[in-house]
Amino acid sequence: MSAHLRGKKILFFGPVTFNYEKAIVDELERQGAQVVYRSDKPGHSFLIKVLVRLFPKMLWGYSDRVFGRWFAKNGPAECDIVFVIKGEGLSPRFLDVLKGQYKNAKFIFYLWDSIKNVRNAELLIPKFDYLYSFDPEDCRQYPLFKYRPLFFLEQYRVSAPTEGKGCFFIGTLNGDRPAVISHVLDALPKTIAFDYSLFVRNDIELFFRRLFDNALKHLDPVRLIRTPMTAQIVSQRFQTSAAIVDIEHPNQVGLTMRTFEVLASGKKLITTNKNIATHDFYHPSRICIIDRIDPKLETDFFEGQMEPLPMSFFVNFSLNGWLLEIFQCVTTNTDKLSQ
């Protein structure tokens, strides 16, 4: 991939998400690209995040002014690729400005959330030449999207995994995760310990969750953390565990980043996502699919031998493999989408 990205100028808009955006920038630059990055939101206050998520149109005028000022000061003079992940805070009008400025650039859109969770994403679709989604259901509903699952960061890849005990979960406090964790605690064999942590984005959200989420009231308050764990710490916690729990958002079908991180680390995966069974890397010796409300977990899963992953997994689902597919339009003669 380095040959076809060397010297390419990329303007990248994407969410600030546990430094994944930084890892993407670093890898693109390692491959020889010149990258200008900007968050896809006009600001990161609690109010801005709520408005962007629930009422994006109401914020578009403000967003256009913020992005316009930023672009006038920081936008590259030339650009080969405009790359957008999610794009929650971007308006169709601002994308038109970019298309007018960079008439020969390829516009690439990747969704690592379901369209139903990204309000007005349908209005952004016509602005892009190439569309990808991590959600197979969205790809069936919107045929212009190509299905491309997520990736793992290299620090999660372990050639010789250590033997661990119990199971581990780390994730943001959202969706029905408190309830699922509570059910898992009840379902686990008594010999299996469960080390879990929920990242609290802000105290306002926590206040309302405690008012309306009975399951949260039954979880240990010490397990609610305010500072996100680094990828290095998470990968270390993986190695001390026998299995890792993954709980995707109930409105999603796509496989989470955690899915690929766990498998790359050589650990067993316990997941609520039934869609994983359709992928060629699925094997019941390393992946246990559980019901969100009535999970079944047996001691044999934790103690049994695990079928090794094929090497193709580490090629296809590395960050490098992900970028190779997303940016394949740079070296192929693939026609742009007809809008």
Image (tube, grey):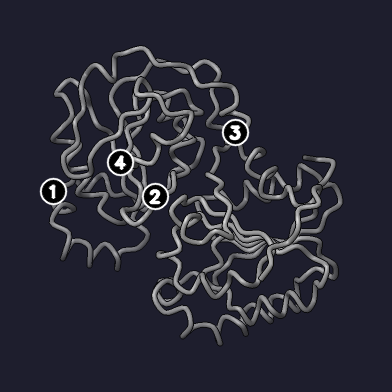
Q: Quickly name the residue at label 2.
A: 253
Is residue 183 rendered to the left or right of residue 50? Answer: left
Q: Nearer the viewer, residue 261 or 310?
A: 310
Question: Which label sits in the foreground, 3 or 2?
Answer: 2
User: Disc 4, disc 1: CB below 8 Å?
Assistant: no
- For the C terminus, give its image quadrant: bottom right
Image location (x, y in percent) of residue 57: 48, 83
Image location (x, y in percent) of residue 253: 39, 50
Q: Secondary structure at mark 3?
A: helix
Question: Which label sits in the foreground, 4 or 1?
Answer: 4
Mark before the other along the chain sequence, 4 or 2: 2
Q: What is the number of the mark on residue 306?
A: none
Q: What is the number of the mark on residue 218?
A: 1
Q: Quickly name the residue at label 4.
A: 272
Is residue 28 rendered to the left or right of residue 315? Answer: right
**Amino acid type, residue under disc 1 in the picture:** His
